[in-house]
Image: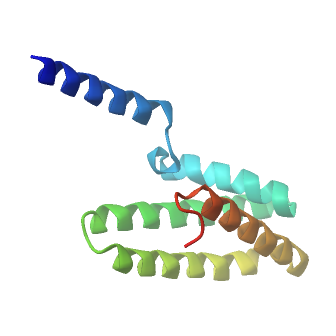
Amino acid sequence: MKKIGTMLMSLMLIAMVGLAQPGQRSMNPEEMAKRQTAQIKEAVGLDEKQEKQVYELNLETGKKMRALREEMQGGAPDGMREKMREIREGQDEKMKEILSEDQWKKYEKFQEERRARWRDRRPGGRR
């Protein structure tokens, strides 16, 4: 009986922790695109036309990433990582067409700072 009680308590704790800390993966592509676009707008100073284009690009990229995650679920992480890198490179090419040269430099700086924050939050630090 004690084992069952301990297992139930463990499962409840795991469920509560998961609910208390929703991550980016739980966001749908539309929410993620809005959030990313707002961050980019603040970082580089988008005008209305650019904001709409960046939102559409982020939405397209988000949908591709979600489809890839679903398709590759349980598969080789290296293969998925490579395909995601290709998607991001395509996004950067299109982003460069939307932004001015000055905005592109700001965007690159924003991306590098974001990557650094992400690396620092990962368990074990830089890899």
Residue 48 shows in this picture = no
The image's colour scheme reads rainbow
Image point 45% across, 45% down: which residue? 26
Above or below, 102 against 48 in this view is: below
Q: How many marks?
A: 0
- Relative placement, left or right, of 123 versus 43 is left
| Closer to us: 83 or 29 | 83
Task: Decide which of 74, 123 is in the foreground and name it.
Answer: 123
Outermost residue toward the left? 1
Residue 106 pos. (x, y %):
85, 71
Q: Nearer the viewer, residue 24 or 21?
A: 21
In the picture provided, is 23 more to the left or to the right than 83?
right
Res 122 quadrant in image:
bottom right
Q: Nearer the viewer, residue 44 or 81?
A: 81
Q: Quadrant of residue 79?
A: bottom left
The percent position of residue 39, horizontal first and vertical second, equals 74, 54
Residue at 36 percent of width and 63 percent of height: 69
Residue at 77 percent of width and 75 percent of height: 108
In the rendered image, the quadrant that contains the C terminus is: bottom right
Which residue: 65% across, 78% down? 92
Identify the image quadrant of residue 64: bottom left
Can the viewer see residue 7? yes
